[in-house]
């Protein structure tokens, strides 16, 4: 793999900041590569990000940037292990039987030693579920990976646990609609095959063994969404029966607190981009789709800039309440901090673009970036701390999206334009630390219903 290492001297950075009037000091790395401010990121762990179809890792300890991939196929979905020792990511599989198939790759946290995982079939996300192709154990250095057999309409061909060092082991076959880790990393939740029209929710030991039945739920398909210590297993209730675009109209996010417990409906939410929900042991935040348009043929419920209200749900009551009670704004992109339960989210004014009374001539249910960029520039980042009387705005965060907390909840990353920004401490303004996440030509593509999702383009071990 090609390695690019750049060390920025403190004096050079200081002089450059004086020349620019203070703030971020971005240094370009190679022709056509990213630009980074290594000094500003010092001491903040490792940052993996995709820039112009290549994967890089910025090391906050050594202040070096490593280029992990070179050439096609383009990488995506970087993710660090819970202890920050390993980095996993996906690359399209050139020999896959279907075009969405991707291969799992592993590397050291700094990007060294990147290699394709052997003895593992190409993986695919479960259709309409929002479920990830892979996820790290919350307690161990191993991954849960779903592989989808072509033409099976949502039947997962297998679920495998992949150690960071070692051979994959298959946990289940023909399990339906996604799978998630338990909070302690010892079990995996999945929808198992059933001889009836019901969805059978089970958990199986991550080392293999007899399953535990949580419940059998009749009617629409259910997709496994998450597992919280206090909320239990979270499911998407697909009342649309898996129909086209139903995930954009919104599915019901529900919870099963314990084996044999009833299914509790929490909120109806679009489940793809931006991230639909986030949770810790005590607090769950979900983007509720509350536009209330009676005629789905209007397409209005699908748009990101109308009828999207962030709600938080308490594990003690299963009651969800709006974070901001203002019908003239949309709130989205929830990120619940892992240590404190603080909620970071994005707020933007409601736009009537694309609604029946605001549809432009020749309207189509998609937009170019040039058309929707002015609305994204109106976004701002807010924080809602437990016990606070109201949320507070992060200084200088105009245009922010896709916030991500550090592991110790002391700092935040967010996207602004095509760059990553760091809020190094509570109350601080953001500093630009990595630019050129994509080229201008790539960013001028078409975005269905206005959604732009950067969350699969970067990961942080800070």
Image: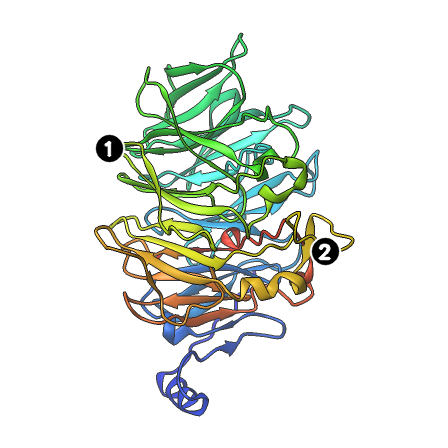
Instruction: Describe the element under mark 1 as helix, strand or loop.
Output: loop
In the picture of the structure, the residue carrying the numbered disc 2 is: 360
Q: Residue at x 52, y 42 (%)?
A: 291
Q: Relative to 237, is 188 on the left or the right? A: left
Q: Residue at x 33, y 15 (%)?
A: 260
Q: Residue at x 24, y 55 (%)?
A: 389
Callout 1: 10 Å neighbours few (<14), some, many (20+)? few
| Quarter of the image where one finds residue 231 | top left
Q: Considering depth in this image, is 427 or 189 the residue closer to the camera?
A: 427
| Quarter of the image where one finds residue 263 | top left
Q: CA distance from mark 2 to mark 1?
A: 46 Å
The colour mode here is: rainbow
Instruction: Describe the element under mark 2 as helix, strand or loop.
Output: loop
Task: Report the number of discs.
Answer: 2
* Mark sitting on residue 140: none
Q: Considering depth in this image, is 318 or 278 the residue closer to the camera?
A: 318
Callout 2: 10 Å neighbours few (<14), some, many (20+)? few
On the question of residue 232 being in view, the answer is yes
Q: Nearer the viewer, mark 2 or mark 1?
A: 2
Q: Relative to 393, is 222 on the left or the right? A: right
Q: Position of residue 377 (x, y in %)?
A: 53, 66
Q: Relative to 173, is 319 on the left or the right? A: left
Q: Position of residue 277 (x, y in %)?
A: 42, 42
Q: Considering depth in this image, is 402 or 91 the residue closer to the camera?
A: 402
Q: Position of residue 445 (x, y in %)?
A: 69, 58
User: Quick check: 140 above or below 9?
Assistant: above
Q: Position of residue 289 (x, y in %)?
A: 50, 41
Q: Considering depth in this image, is 63 or 21 the residue closer to the camera?
A: 21
Q: Earlier in the sequence, mark 2 or mark 1?
A: 1
User: Quick check: 98 above or below 391?
Assistant: above
* Residue closest to the far right: 362
In the picture of the structure, the residue carrying the numbered disc 1 is: 316
């Amino acid at each position: 793999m090609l390695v690019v290492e750049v060390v920025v001297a403190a004096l050079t950075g200081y002089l450059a900041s004086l020349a620019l009037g203070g703030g971020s000091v971005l240094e370009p790395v190679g022709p056509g590569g990213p630009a980074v401010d290594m000094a500003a990121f010092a001491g903040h762990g490792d940052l993996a990000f995709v820039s112009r179809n290549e994967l890089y890792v910025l090391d906050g300890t050594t202040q070096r940037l490593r280029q992990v991939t070179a050439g096609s196929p383009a990488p995506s979905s970087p993710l660090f292990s819970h202890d920050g020792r390993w980095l996993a990511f996906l690359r399209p599989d050139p020999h896959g039987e279907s075009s969405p198939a991707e291969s799992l790759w592993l590397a050291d946290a700094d990007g060294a030693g990147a290699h394709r995982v052997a003895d593992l079939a190409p993986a695919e996300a479960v259709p309409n579920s929002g479920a990830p192709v892979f996820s790290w154990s919350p307690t161990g250095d191993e991954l849960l990976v779903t592989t989808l057999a072509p033409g099976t309409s949502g039947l997962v061909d297998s679920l495998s646990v992949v150690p960071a060092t070692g051979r994959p082991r298959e946990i289940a076959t023909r399990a339906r609609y996604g799978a998630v880790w338990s909070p302690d990393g010892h079990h995996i939740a999945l929808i198992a095959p059933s001889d009836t029209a019901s969805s059978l929710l089970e958990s199986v030991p991550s080392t293999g063994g007899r399953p535990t039945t949580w419940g059998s739920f009749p009617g629409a398909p259910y997709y496994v969404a998450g597992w919280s210590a206090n909320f239990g297993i979270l499911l998407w209730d697909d009342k649309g029966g898996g129909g086209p675009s139903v995930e954009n109209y919104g599915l019901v996010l529900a919870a099963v607190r314990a084996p044999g417990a009833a299914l509790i409906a929490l909120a109806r939410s679009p489940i793809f981009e931006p991230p639909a929900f986030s949770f810790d042991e005590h607090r769950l935040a979900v983007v509720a789709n509350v536009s209330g348009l009676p005629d789905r043929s209007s397409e209005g419920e699908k748009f990101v800039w109308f009828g999207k209200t962030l709600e938080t749900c308490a594990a003690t009551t299963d009651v969800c309440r709006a974070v901001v009670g203002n019908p003239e704004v949309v709130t989205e992109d929830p990120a619940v901090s892992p240590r404190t339960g603080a909620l970071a989210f994005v707020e933007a004014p409601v736009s009537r673009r694309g609604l029946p009374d605001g549809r432009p001539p020749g309207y189509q249910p998609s937009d170019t970036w040039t058309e929707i960029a002015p609305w994204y520039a109106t976004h701002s980042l807010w924080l809602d701390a437990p016990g606070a009387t109201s949320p507070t705005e992060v200084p200088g965060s105009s245009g922010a999206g896709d916030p991500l907390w550090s592991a110790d909840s002391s700092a935040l990353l967010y996207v602004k334009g095509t760059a990553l920004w760091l809020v190094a401490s509570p109350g601080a303004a953001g500093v630009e630390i990595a630019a050129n996440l994509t080229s201008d030509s790539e960013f001028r593509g078409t975005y269905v219903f206005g959604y732009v999702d950067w969350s699969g383009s970067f990961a942080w071990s800070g």
